[in-house]
Image (tube, helix red, strand yellow):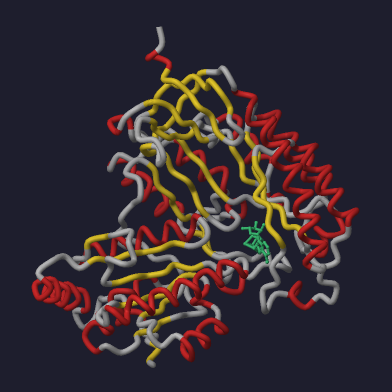
């Protein structure tokens, strides 16, 4: 196995990697008498979704047709997540399935990238027990893919390039966007927060902000291509800071809102300790910023928050969410909650439940604590037994669901603007879109509506979504 480390070589700028790769794929396509197909499967967060768009773009430019079927594919790439153990387990399970496909189709190439590839533990396991994985690259170097793929196709040898250090800021990669009308845009990479349960700072590295000029140019280009909604992405967008111009996140948001053609601006994730009054003010004054904030709280217990290294208290969290509700009427507040953190007692969970009721979340993604090797909390001696975690998890989930159901209902009967995203997956006589506050709406429609902003009456709230009717259909 060879680990390539020379960026220029791997990135396709030296040794004519790109033309050689394109030629190789042309040859293989001709020999096969059909298009070669590539399948990129994403696990995990919005950052990974965005990276996958770049991976798909690179492969499409190289001559692959894209498919969603691993069975049809000549190249499968798993873009992985390590935030919780079950994501890991799923990937290893699916690699087993790919192995059986490769037995039937030996030319199949298999790649693994993303956060799991950044973990030494995982790389060792793949090296020893998954010899059929051909290509591996990390979150720092998507641009290595062309060189690695070329090497694998030319020699049949394993091609790996994973880096711990170095910038993850790679401008100008081709991309193949999932939606023509909306796009994620990275503004920061990595994280400096070191919450004691979280593996992200270890795999994604120290926080780095992109230059504001580059972010704005990317969004201007997206707008010119017909994108109307952007989601600014980072592990903690509130700590964004342009290295050249001392631009803060709220200042960047204002500049994004000035771009013609952009109608909706979203961002995620925010960290409660870094959420400034300046941001709240900008959210209140800029009409293009959607009235939604994803503000992970993790726990309502000050004792647990301290052990998690979160740098805020329950009272502070309540104070900022109160301010947000005042400044942005109708704002949807969503959150992440971890249940079963080491040392968590029934009383701590009661505090979390009380907070859920007080803040009235529109949704809360509730996770069972998963010890991640290498993080401080994984070594805490007071891990909570599984049966207790399960009971406490169910208690929190029940409260979250009841609260969210009541909250989301608040718009019933109103007419709101929906950005139509796709045909409904179960019933093609319906289309599915989102309200400014991110709630999903289904209503009768057709393919021609995709990408349009339509006025829809929110007739009935069905738990976490609305059934609606186009307003100008009514008479
Ligand atoms: N166990 C469970 N949930 C976790 N998260 C991060 N690390 C862990 C872990 N070790 C959750 C947090 C975070 C979300 C992205 O994933 O709630 O906000
Ligand atoms: Fe992980 Fe905390 Fe950073 Fe979020 S802020 S990525 S939970 S370390």
Camera-side residue: 469 or 311? Answer: 469
Q: Which residue extends farthest right?
A: 347
Identify the residue at image location x=39%, y=38%: 421
Q: Count the labels in the image.
A: 0
Identify the residue at image location x=34%, y=66%: 70
Q: Would residue 47 appear left or right of 377 to someone viewing this image?
A: left
Give coordinates of residue 82: x percent, y percent. 57, 69
**Which image quarter: residue 383?**
bottom right
Camera-side residue: 113 or 340? Answer: 340
Instruction: Find ligand 1 in the image and state its quadrant.
Output: bottom right
Camera-side residue: 375 or 73? Answer: 73
Give coordinates of residue 430: x percent, y percent. 39, 31
For the N terminus, the quadrant is: bottom left
Give coordinates of residue 204: x percent, y percent. 55, 70
Camera-side residue: 152 or 430? Answer: 430
Looking at the image, residue 473 lies above or below residue 4 = above
Give coordinates of residue 51: x percent, y percent. 41, 61
**Which image quarter: residue 162?**
bottom left
**Which image quarter: residue 334?**
top right
For the C terminus, the quadrant is: top left
Identify the residue at image location x=54%, y=50%: 247
Looking at the image, residue 329 lies above or below residue 319 = above
Q: Would residue 287 appear left or right of 83 to someone viewing this image?
A: left
Q: Would residue 99 appear left or right of 338 to someone viewing this image?
A: left
């Amino acid at each position: 196995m060879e680990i390539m480390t020379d960026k220029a070589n791997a990135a396709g700028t030296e040794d004519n990697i790109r033309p050689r790769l394109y030629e190789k794929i042309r040859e293989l396509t001709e020999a096969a008498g059909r298009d070669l197909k590539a399948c990129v499967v994403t696990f995990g967060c919005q950052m990974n979704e965005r990276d996958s768009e770049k991976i798909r773009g690179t492969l499409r430019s190289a001559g692959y047709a894209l498919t969603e079927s691993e069975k049809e594919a000549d190249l499968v790439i798993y873009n992985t997540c390590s935030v919780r153990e079950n994501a890991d387990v799923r990937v290893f399970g699916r690699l087993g399935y790919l192995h059986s496909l490769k037995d039937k189709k030996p030319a199949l190439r298999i790649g693994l990238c993303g956060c799991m590839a950044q973990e030494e533990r995982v790389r060792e396991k793949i090296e020893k027990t998954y010899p059929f994985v051909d290509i591996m690259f990390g979150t720092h170097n998507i641009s290595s893919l062309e060189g690695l793929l070329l090497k694998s196709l030319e020699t049949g040898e394993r091609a790996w390039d994973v880096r711990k250090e170095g910038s993850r800021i790679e401008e100008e990669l081709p991309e193949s966007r999932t939606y023509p009308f909306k796009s994620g845009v990275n503004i920061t990479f990595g994280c400096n927060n070191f919450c004691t349960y979280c593996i992200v700072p270890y795999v994604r590295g120290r926080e780095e902000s992109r230059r504001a000029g580059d972010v704005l140019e990317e969004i201007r280009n997206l707008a010119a291509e017909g994108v109307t909604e952007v989601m600014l992405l980072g592990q903690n967008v509130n700590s964004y800071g342009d290295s050249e111009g001392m631009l803060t996140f709220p200042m960047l948001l204002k500049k994004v809102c000035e771009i013609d053609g952009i109608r909706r601006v979203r961002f995620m994730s925010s960290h409660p300790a870094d959420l400034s009054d300046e941001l709240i003010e900008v959210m209140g004054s800029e009409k293009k910023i959607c009235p939604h904030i994803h503000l992970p709280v993790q726990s309502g217990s000050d004792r647990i928050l301290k052990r998690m290294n979160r740098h805020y208290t329950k009272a502070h969290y309540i104070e900022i969410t109160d301010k947000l509700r005042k400044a942005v009427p109708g704002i949807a507040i969503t959150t992440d909650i971890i249940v079963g953190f080491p040392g968590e007692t029934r009383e701590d969970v009661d505090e979390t439940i009380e907070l859920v009721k007080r803040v009235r979340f529109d949704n809360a993604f509730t996770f069972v604590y998963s010890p991640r090797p290498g993080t401080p909390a994984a070594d805490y001696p007071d891990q909570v037994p599984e049966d207790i975690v399960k009971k406490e998890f169910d208690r929190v989930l029940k409260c979250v669901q009841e609260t969210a159901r009541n909250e989301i209902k608040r718009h019933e009967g109103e007419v709101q603007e929906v950005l139509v995203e796709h045909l409904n997956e179960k019933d093609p006589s319906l289309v599915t879109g989102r309200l400014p506050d991110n709630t999903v709406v289904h209503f009768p429609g057709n393919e021609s509506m995709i990408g349009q902003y339509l006025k829809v009456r929110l007739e009935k709230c069905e738990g976490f979504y609305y059934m609606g009717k186009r307003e100008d259909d009514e008479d």
